[in-house]
Image (cartoon, rainbow, N blue to C red):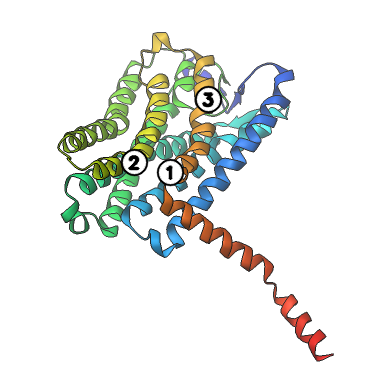
C-alpha cells in the first residue's frame, strides 16, 4: 500500500501563499515589483563590485557573490509563485519539485557560508589590520567559495535523496514552492530517520556558519573595547553594521522556520516567513550594503554614468551626424 501510494505521486499541487482566490491579484501586484527590485538591485551591485576598479578587493568579491546568491534564491521560488497566482493549474512534477528543493537548499545554505566568510574578513580587518593583505586574498576567497559550494551541494543532494524515498499520502503542498518541511508533512508515516538526518545535517551545514559569525564578532567586540581612538571605533562599527543587519535578517527567519520542534510547526506562519527571506531580504540587502557605504555608492554612480553614456551613444547616430555634416 505504501509503495503504491508513493508511485502514484507523480506531481504536487502547490497551494500558494494564500488559498483565497480574491487575494491572488493582490499578491501578484505586491510581490512582482519587489521581485524586480530585488533582481535589479542585486544585479547592479554585483556588476559594480566586479567591474569597478576601486572595488577589486576580497570583501567586495564576497559581496558580489552574495548578490548572485540573492538573485538565485528569489528566482528559484518567486517566478513560479507569480505564475501560479494567476493560473488555475498549480501543479509541479515530482522531478521538478525535487530539483527545486535541491537548488533552494543549496543556494539558501550558501548564503550563510558567504556571510561567515565576510565575518572572517571583517575580523581580520579590525583585529589584525597590518596582516590583512597577507591573510585575505582573492585566491583565498575563491577557494572558500568553491569549497562552500561543494559542501552545500552535497548536503542538498542528501536532502533531496531522503525526500524522494518518502512515502506520500497526498500531493497538496501547503506552500508556494517545494520546501523540505511541507514535504515531510505529506509523509504517511513519521520519517524519524530522515528528520534526524535532516536536523543533524542542518545544524552542521546551516547553523555552524552562524556560530562562526558569532565567534568572529565576539573577537571583534573584544578588539573594539580596547580601541582608544573614537575615529577607529566609529570606522569599526560602520564596517560591521551592514553585515550584522543582513545576518540578523537571514538567521532570524531561518531559526523561526527550520530550527524548532516539528510539533510547533505552523504551515501558514512558515509561508509568511518564507516570503520574507525569498523576496524581502534579497530586496533589502543591496540597500543595506549601499546606503551607508561611500565606496559602493561611488561605484554605482560611475556605473550609472557609464550606462547612460553607452545608451546615448548609438552606432547609427555617429553615421547620421557624419552624413549630415558632409551634406
Query: Which residue is more in the foreground, 29 or 19?
Result: 29
Q: Which residue is mark 3?
A: 7
Residue furthest to the right: 327
Say which element carries label 2: helix
The reply to whether discs 3 and 1 touch (Cβ–Cβ < 8 Å) is no
Task: Tell me the quarter of the image containing the C terminus.
Answer: bottom right
Kindly identify the residue that appears in the image at 40 percent across and 26 percent down. Answer: 254
Kindly identify the residue that appears in the image at 14 percent across and 37 percent down. Answer: 226
Q: Residue 207: percent from the left, percent from the top?
A: 29, 29
Q: Residue 259: percent from the left, percent from the top?
A: 35, 20
* Residue 252 circle label: none
Q: How far is mark 3 from mark 1, CA to CA?
A: 54 Å
Tell me the crowding category of disc 3: few under 14, some 14 to 19, or many 20 or more residues within 10 angstroms, Cα based. Answer: few
Q: Residue 142: percent from the left, percent from the top?
A: 31, 55
Tell me the crowding category of disc 2: few under 14, some 14 to 19, or many 20 or more residues within 10 angstroms, Cα based. Answer: few
The reply to whether discs 1 and 2 touch (Cβ–Cβ < 8 Å) is yes
Residue furthest to the bottom: 326
Say which element carries label 3: helix
Q: Earlier in the sequence, mark 3 or mark 1?
A: 3
Q: Is residue 127 left or right of residue 70?
A: left
Q: Compared with residue 144, is residue 4 higher up or lower down, i.e. above or below?
A: above
Residue 169 visible in the snapshot: no
Q: Which residue is mark 2?
A: 238
**Picture quarter containing residue 275?**
top right
Kindly identify the residue that appears in the image at 53 percent across and 57 percent down. Answer: 301
Q: Which residue is mark 1?
A: 292
Q: Earlier in the sequence, mark 3 or mark 2?
A: 3
Q: How many marks?
A: 3
Q: How far is mark 3 from mark 2, CA to CA?
A: 55 Å
Q: Residue 155: percent from the left, percent from the top?
A: 34, 36
Query: Which residue is more in the foreground, 192 or 52?
Result: 52
Amino acid at each position: 500500500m505504501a509503495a503504491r501510494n508513493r508511485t502514484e505521486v507523480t506531481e504536487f499541487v502547490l497551494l500558494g501563499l494564500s488559498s483565497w482566490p480574491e487575494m491572488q491579484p493582490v499578491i501578484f501586484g505586491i510581490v512582482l515589483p519587489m521581485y524586480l527590485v530585488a533582481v535589479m538591485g542585486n544585479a547592479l551591485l554585483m556588476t559594480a563590485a566586479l567591474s569597478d576598479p576601486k572595488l577589486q578587493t576580497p570583501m567586495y568579491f564576497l559581496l558580489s557573490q552574495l548578490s548572485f546568491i540573492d538573485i538565485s534564491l528569489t528566482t528559484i521560488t518567486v517566478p513560479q509563485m507569480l505564475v501560479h497566482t494567476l493560473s488555475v493549474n498549480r501543479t509541479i512534477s515530482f522531478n521538478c519539485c525535487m530539483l527545486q528543493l535541491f537548488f533552494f537548499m543549496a543556494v539558501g545554505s550558501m548564503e550563510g557560508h558567504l556571510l561567515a566568510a565576510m565575518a572572517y574578513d571583517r575580523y581580520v580587518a579590525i583585529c589584525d589590520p597590518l596582516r590583512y593583505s597577507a591573510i585575505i586574498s582573492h585566491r583565498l576567497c575563491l577557494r572558500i567559495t568553491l569549497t562552500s559550494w561543494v559542501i552545500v551541494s552535497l548536503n542538498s543532494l542528501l536532502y533531496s535523496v531522503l525526500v524522494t524515498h518518502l512515502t506520500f499520502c497526498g500531493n497538496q503542498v501547503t506552500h508556494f514552492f517545494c520546501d523540505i518541511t511541507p514535504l515531510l508533512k505529506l509523509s504517511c508515516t513519521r520519517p524519524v530517520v530522515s528528520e534526524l538526518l535532516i536536523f543533524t545535517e542542518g545544524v552542521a551545514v546551516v547553523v555552524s556558519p552562524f556560530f562562526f559569525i558569532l565567534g568572529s564578532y565576539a573577537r571583534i567586540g573584544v578588539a573594539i573595547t580596547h580601541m582608544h581612538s573614537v575615529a577607529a571605533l566609529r570606522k569599526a562599527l560602520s564596517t560591521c553594521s551592514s553585515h550584522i543587519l543582513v545576518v540578523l535578517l537571514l538567521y532570524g527567519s531561518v531559526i523561526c522556520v527550520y530550527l524548532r520542534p516539528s510539533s510547533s510547526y505552523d504551515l501558514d506562519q512558515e509561508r509568511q516567513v518564507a516570503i520574507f527571506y525569498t523576496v524581502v531580504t534579497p530586496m533589502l540587502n543591496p540597500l543595506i550594503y549601499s546606503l551607508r557605504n561611500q565606496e559602493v555608492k561611488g561605484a554605482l554612480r560611475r556605473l550609472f554614468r557609464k550606462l547612460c553614456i553607452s545608451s546615448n551613444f548609438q552606432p547609427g547616430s555617429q553615421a547620421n551626424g557624419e552624413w549630415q555634416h558632409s551634406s
